[in-house]
Amino acid sequence: MLLDVMQAGGGFILLEDSVQCSARGLLRCFIHAALKRGEDVHVLGFESPETQVCAGLDSSSVQRLHFHKGFPDPLGWTCRSSFTVERFTSQHITQLIKDTQHAQASVLVVDSLSMVLRHHDPVVFCQTLQELRKGGVIKTIIGLLHSDLHQQGIVGIVCHLADTVISVAPADNERLSVAKTTRRTKSGKVMQEEEYFSVSEDAALSVQAKPCQPGHVQRERDVSEADPTSNLTFNLRLSEDERKAKEKVALPFVFSQQK
């Protein structure tokens, strides 16, 4: 499912990580995939320099990548950034994308949403995301969220807004990480899958299916094979004589010709 989400794009995709496992490499994979689809990508870079984001890209892809510098001065204290956290509003971002020479439905990447949340009211932040999604200028929003920096209630609200949530965690194998993908379709159906993944230096994503744990499979099998009607103190079915006797019983408050 992880590869399908990355290749298709669309909607609000949330990458959720923590200090134990970073999703920044996965974020680079999503950026490269969008550029390969021929889409314009706008990156609000508050935590990473432009050189790190553009590493490994060819010249044609670099032309479609628009990096709005927020690093290393996201608050604008030294006037070294072209885009600050304060300007994270639907009006500023929409105008920023429209000013692009080849303005079209673009991909917006926020690195990271945690930096914005630390300096914006959560309600205003959520309203901004909703306005950007419905504005028609942005096709896909990809945001990186450091979940261990926020209260669980705020993390839950942001996850609720997202169409797809990808939570990463360390695996037993140091070379791999675990991605738990939760995807909500337009019909309201929720799909979930856990996979192993790794990211190479050139932002190539490798995905492996995570095998099911035998204990969980056996437990589900035991539950499905259990007979709920066993060991009951009464019968669920009537015999022929019991059925005839039941039909002869006159129910109360029912009109009868015998009365």
Image (cartoon, grey):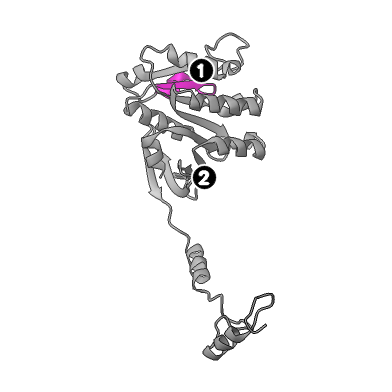
Residue 161 drawn at (x, y percent): 55, 35
> Which stretch did the figure color magenta?
41-54
Residue visible at 55% across and 91% down in the picture: 241
Q: Please name whichever residue, 61 or 173, is drawn nearer the observer in this view of the structure.
A: 61
User: Which residue does the numbered mark 1 point to in the structure image?
Assistant: 93
Secondary structure found at label 1: helix
Residue lying at 43% horizontally and 20% vertically, measured from the top left: 51
Is residue 200 visible in the rendered image? The answer is no
Residue 170 numbered mark, or none:
2
| Depth check, front residue: 169 or 83 | 83
Q: Position of residue 59 (x, y in %)?
A: 31, 18
x then y, percent, for residue 229:
56, 78
Instruction: Find out whether residue 106 is within the magenta segment.
Output: no
Image position, residue 165 (x, y; %): 51, 40
Q: Residue at x 59, y 88 (%)?
A: 245
Q: Nearer the viewer, mark 2 or mark 1?
A: 1
User: Can you say whether 72 is above or below 258 in the image?
Assistant: above
* Mark 2: secondary structure: strand
Residue closer to the observer: 109 or 173: 109
The three-letter amino acid code for the residue at tag 1 is Ile
Who comes first in sequence, dot 2 or dot 1? 1
